[in-house]
C-alpha cells in the first residue's frame, strides 16, 4: 500500500471526495479535498477505501493516551481546535497533510529523556514501530508546532525543532494553510496572492482583520507567540509525574510492586516540596507492543505516605496482564490537595486514622457508593427522615430525639402492598384484622394507631395521606402498616412499610 | 467458711482465665491473670452466665435469625450489643450488609437513636457476595480501625469462621455475624452462637386496655457457648429507655411484669 497511490474517500454533498492520500498519491498531484472523479482523471489506477472516521478518532485517542508517557498533558488536535469544531462537515475534521495530530505539552519534561532531540527521535521511532508514519515538531507555541509538524522542512528523522525566539523566521516560508485556517479564508488569501505566512506578516494588521476577520489575526499571533495559547493556562508547576523505563521488559507482579514503590518515593518527595498530598493516582504500564494498562487509586483525604499509598494499590497489581512485558511505567498524581508540613506516619497516630485508611481501602476495592452512612433528616415522611447514603455526600445529621414515637428497625423500600382478607372496618381508627403479606397470613392481635402522616405540601408527589398502625400478629411479629387514601380516586390500599423489633 | 468459698471462687476464675488464654493461643512465658475485656450486655443474669462476664471482645459471635419474621428482633438484638459496646469504647462500628438480604428491609437510621447509637458512629458497607463481606470483615479487623465489625452473611463454613475468629482474637475486637438461619447453617468457630426469636408482647397498663402492642419480647437462646453452658432467656426491649432487660416469667402474669419494669 505504501508504494502505490492510495486514498481514503468520503462523501460531501453527494459527491465522493478524497479524504486522505498517501505520499505517492500526493506526488501524482492528488490532494485531500479533491473530487474522486477528478482524481481518477489524473490517475486512473488510484485505489480507494471508504473512510472510517470513528475508528480513526479512536485510534488517535489511543495514540494520545500512549503519548502521555512523555508528558501528563496531551490532547488531540481536533478536540482542542475551536475553528474546526465550528465546521459543519464533521467528515473533514481530520484535515491537512497527515490527518489528525496530538499536542504534547513537553514543558519541563524533555530533560527526563535527555533533551528535546532525543525525545523527538524516540517519539517518532516508537510510533514508527507501532506502524504509523509520523512527523513531529517542537516549538515555543502550539500553533508553530502544529505548522512545523505538517508543513515544515523535516530532517530525515521526520522531526523539526524551532529554537526559542525563532518562531517568526521559521514560520515565514510556510503556506498560509499552516495557520489552521478554515478553507474559505485560505481560498480568499490565495485569490489575492497571499501564499505564505511571511506574506501575511508583512501586511498591516488593521487591513488583515478588516478583510478576513479577527480569527486570522488570532491564529497568526498565537503561532508567532504574541498571544499565548497553551494547553493549560495555569502557572507552571513541576508536574507530579514520575516515570521509569526498563532496559529489559518486566513481567511479574513483584517487579511492578517494586517499580511502584520506587516511583512513589520520588513522587512523595515532589509532593512534599509542593506541599500537597495525592487524592488520586494513576499508575500506567506501557507494554512492549504499545498497549497500555492503567490502575487508579483514590483516597478520601490527601496522602503523602509511601506505605499508605502503596497499600491503596495492593489488590490491583496482581491482576495486571504483562503481555509481552512492560517496558515503562509512569505514576501521575492526577488530583492533589494541600497537605502541610511533613506528614507523620498515619499508622502511628491512632485509631481514627486507621479507620479512614480502612475506608480508603474498602472504597478502592468496592467503590464509594458501597460505603454508606446513616442520615437523619427532619421530615415527617418516613422514607425521607432516615436514609443510608454514600459517605462522600456531605450531610449533617439533625439532632432529633425520637422520644415518644417508636420507629421500626428495618424499613422496606418501597412499601409493599398487602392483600386484606375479609371485611375491613370502615372506621378509620382500625387496621384490617387479617392480611396476607408475602404469601403469609398475618392475624392481627394487637394494634396501635393511627398515626397520620400527610405528604409534605411543598413536595408534589404521588403519595397520599397515610395512616400508620403498629400491629402485632398472632406469632409475635410486629409490623408497621399504613393505609393510603388517595383523595382523587378514593381508593384505599394497605401497605407494609417497616418491621419492628 | 465464707473465706473458703471466696478462695474457691477466685481459684476457679483464675483457672478459667488461664484456660481462656491457652485457648485463645496467647503465647506468653508467664500467664497473667487478667480476664479478657468484654462487652457487658447490662443484664446481670446474662453477663454472669457468660464465661468472661460478658461477650468476649476478641472473638466471633454469631446471631442466627431462625425465620424471616424474626429478622427485626435479631437486628435489634445486634444493635443493643453494639450500643453497649459503643458506650464504653471509642471508635466507629462497621456494619457489612448483604444486598441480597435487603428484601427483609433496610436498617432504618432513626431506630439507631432509639438504641442509643449516634448515627455517625456506624458506617455501612453494602456488598453482594458473602466472600467479599468476609474479606472486608477480616480486613477491618486487621486494620484495628473500627470498634466492632458486623456482617450479614448467608453462607460460610468452619474454615472461614475460624479465620474470622483468629482475626478478631488478634485484633482484640469483636466480630459479629448475623445470618438468616433458613438459608442454611454451618459448623462454626464462633465463641458464642445465639438464636433470637420474636414472641408475642405482653402489654400492661394503658396499652393493655387499648389492646396495643407492648415492649418487644424475644426469646434469646444461647445455643452454643465456648467454655460455657447454653442458656435461654426471655428478654424485653424497653422502648422508652432503649435498652434490654430480662422479662419477668410469664407465669407471674402481665401485671407483675408491669411492677418489675417500674422497679
Image (cartoon, coloured by chain):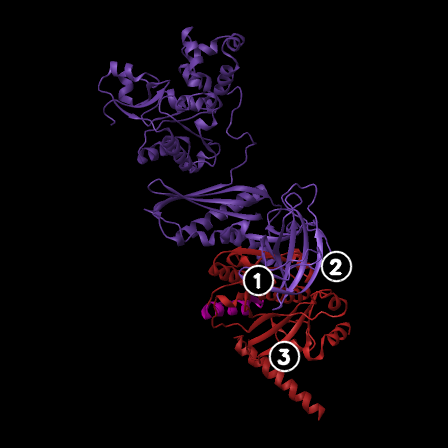
Chain colours: A purple, B red
Q: Nearer the viewer, mark 3 or mark 1?
A: 3
The residue furthest front is A423
**In front of the other: A198 or A190:** A190
Magenta-drawn segment: B157-176
Q: Nearer the viewer, mark 2 or mark 1?
A: 2
Is residue A216 placed above or below A392 in the rendered structure? Answer: above
Q: Could you say where residue A385 lies in the image, as x and y percent from the top left? A: 67, 51
- Chain for disc number 1: B
Determine if the magenta segment contains residue B18: no
Q: Is residue A487 left or right of residue A356?
A: right
- Chain for disc number 3: B
Q: Could you say where residue A466 lies in the image, as x and y percent from the top left? A: 67, 51
Decide which of tag 3 and tag 1 comes sooner along the chain: 3
Q: Which type of secondary structure does the marked residue at label 1 adopt? A: loop
| Marking on residue A403 | 2
Same subunit: marks 2 and 1: no
Residue B67 visible in the current orientation: yes
Q: For mark 3, what is the residue?
A: B49
The residues bearing labels 2 and 3 have C-alpha atoms spaced at a distance of 33 Å
Q: Is residue B88 left or right of residue B74?
A: right
Q: Could you say where residue A176 lies in the image, as x and y percent from the top left? A: 42, 14
Amino acid at each position: 500500500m505504501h508504494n502505490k497511490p492510495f486514498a481514503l474517500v468520503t462523501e460531501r454533498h453527494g459527491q465522493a471526495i478524497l479524504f486522505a492520500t498517501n505520499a505517492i498519491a500526493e506526488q501524482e498531484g492528488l490532494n485531500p479535498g479533491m473530487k474522486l472523479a477528478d482524481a481518477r482523471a489524473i490517475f486512473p489506477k488510484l485505489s480507494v477505501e471508504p473512510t472510517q472516521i470513528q475508528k480513526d478518532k479512536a485510534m488517535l485517542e489511543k495514540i494520545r493516551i500512549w503519548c502521555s508517557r512523555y508528558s501528563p498533558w496531551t490532547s488531540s488536535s481536533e478536540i482542542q481546535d475551536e475553528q474546526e469544531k465550528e465546521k459543519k462537515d464533521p467528515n473533514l475534521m481530520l484535515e491537512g497533510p497527515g490527518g489528525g495530530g496530538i499536542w504534547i505539552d513537553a514543558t519541563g519534561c524533555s530533560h527526563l529523556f535527555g533533551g528535546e532531540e532525543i525525545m523527538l527521535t524516540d517519539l517518532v521511532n516508537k510510533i514508527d514501530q507501532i506502524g504509523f508514519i509520523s512527523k513531529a515538531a517542537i516549538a515555543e507555541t502550539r500553533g508553530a508546532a502544529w505548522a512545523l509538524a505538517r508543513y515544515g522542512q523535516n530532517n530525515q528523522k521526520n522531526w523539526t525543532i524551532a529554537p526559542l525566539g525563532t518562531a517568526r523566521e521559521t514560520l515565514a516560508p510556510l503556506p498560509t494553510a499552516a495557520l489552521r485556517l478554515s478553507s474559505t479564508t485560505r481560498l480568499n488569501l490565495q485569490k489575492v496572492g497571499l501564499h505564505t505566512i511571511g506574506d501575511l506578516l508583512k501586511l498591516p494588521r488593521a487591513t488583515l482583520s478588516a478583510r478576513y476577520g479577527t480569527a486570522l489575526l488570532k491564529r497568526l499571533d498565537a503561532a508567532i507567540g504574541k498571544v499565548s495559547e497553551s494547553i493549560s493556562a495555569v502557572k507552571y508547576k513541576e508536574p507530579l509525574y514520575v516515570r521509569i523505563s526498563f532496559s529489559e521488559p518486566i513481567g511479574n507482579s513483584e517487579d511492578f510492586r517494586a517499580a511502584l514503590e520506587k516511583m512513589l518515593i520520588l513522587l512523595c518527595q515532589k509532593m512534599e516540596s509542593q506541599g500537597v498530598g495525592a487524592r488520586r493516582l494513576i499508575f500506567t504500564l506501557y507494554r512492549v507492543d504499545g498497549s497500555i494498562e492503567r490502575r487508579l487509586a483514590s483516597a478520601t483525604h490527601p496522602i503523602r505516605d509511601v506505605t499508605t499509598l502503596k497499600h491503596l494499590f495492593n489488590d490491583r497489581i496482581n491482576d495486571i496482564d504483562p503481555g509481552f512485558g512492560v517496558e515503562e511505567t509512569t505514576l501521575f498524581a492526577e488530583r492533589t490537595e494541600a497537605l502541610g508540613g511533613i506528614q507523620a506516619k498515619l499508622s502511628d497516630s491512632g485509631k481514627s486514622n486507621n479507620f479512614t485508611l480502612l475506608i480508603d481501602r474498602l472504597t478502592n476495592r468496592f467503590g464509594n457508593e458501597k460505603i454508606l452512612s446513616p442520615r437523619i433528616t427532619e421530615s415527617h415522611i418516613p422514607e425521607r427522615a432516615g436514609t443510608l447514603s454514600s459517605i462522600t455526600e456531605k450531610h449533617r445529621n439533625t439532632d432529633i430525639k425520637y422520644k415518644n414515637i417508636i420507629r421500626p428497625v428495618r424499613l422496606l423500600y418501597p412499601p409493599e402492598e398487602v392483600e386484606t382478607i375479609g371485611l375491613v372496618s370502615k372506621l378509620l381508627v382500625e387496621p384490617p384484622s387479617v392480611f396476607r403479606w408475602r404469601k403469609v397470613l398475618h392475624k392481627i392481635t394487637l394494634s396501635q394507631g393511627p398515626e397520620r402522616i400527610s405528604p409534605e405540601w411543598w413536595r408534589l408527589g404521588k403519595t397520599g395521606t397515610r395512616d400508620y398502625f403498629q400491629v402485632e400478629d398472632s406469632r409475635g411479629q410486629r409490623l408497621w402498616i399504613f393505609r393510603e387514601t388517595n383523595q382523587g380516586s378514593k381508593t384505599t390500599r394497605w401497605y407494609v412499610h417497616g418491621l419492628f423489633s | 467458711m465464707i473465706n473458703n468459698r471466696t478462695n474457691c471462687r477466685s481459684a476457679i476464675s483464675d483457672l478459667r482465665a488461664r484456660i481462656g488464654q491457652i485457648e485463645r493461643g496467647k503465647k506468653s512465658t508467664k500467664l497473667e491473670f487478667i480476664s479478657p475485656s468484654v462487652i457487658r450486655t447490662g443484664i446481670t443474669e446474662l453477663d454472669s452466665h457468660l464465661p468472661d462476664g460478658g461477650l468476649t471482645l476478641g472473638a466471633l459471635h454469631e446471631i442466627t435469625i431462625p425465620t424471616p419474621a424474626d429478622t427485626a428482633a435479631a437486628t435489634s438484638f445486634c444493635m443493643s450489643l453494639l450500643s453497649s459496646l459503643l458506650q464504653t469504647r471509642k471508635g466507629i462500628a462497621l456494619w457489612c450488609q448483604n444486598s441480597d438480604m435487603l428484601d427483609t428491609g433496610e436498617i432504618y437510621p432513626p431506630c439507631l437513636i432509639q438504641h442509643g447509637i449516634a448515627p455517625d458512629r456506624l458506617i455501612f458497607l453494602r456488598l453482594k457476595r458473602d466472600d467479599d463481606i468476609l474479606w472486608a470483615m477480616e480486613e477491618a479487623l486487621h486494620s484495628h480501625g473500627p470498634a466492632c465489625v458486623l456482617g450479614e452473611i448467608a453462607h460460610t463454613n468452619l474454615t472461614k469462621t475460624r479465620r474470622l475468629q483468629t482475626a478478631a482474637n488478634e485484633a482484640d475486637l469483636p466480630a459479629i455475624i448475623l445470618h438468616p438461619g433458613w438459608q442454611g447453617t454451618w459448623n462454626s468457630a464462633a465463641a458464642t452462637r445465639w438464636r433470637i426469636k420474636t414472641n408475642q408482647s405482653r402489654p400492661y397498663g394503658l396499652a393493655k386496655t387499648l389492646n396495643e402492642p407492648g415492649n418487644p419480647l424475644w426469646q434469646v437462646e444461647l445455643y452454643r457457648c465456648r467454655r460455657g453452658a447454653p442458656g435461654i432467656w426471655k428478654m424485653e426491649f424497653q422502648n422508652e429507655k432503649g435498652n434490654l432487660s430480662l422479662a419477668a416469667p410469664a407465669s407471674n402474669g402481665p401485671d407483675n411484669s408491669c411492677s418489675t419494669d417500674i422497679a
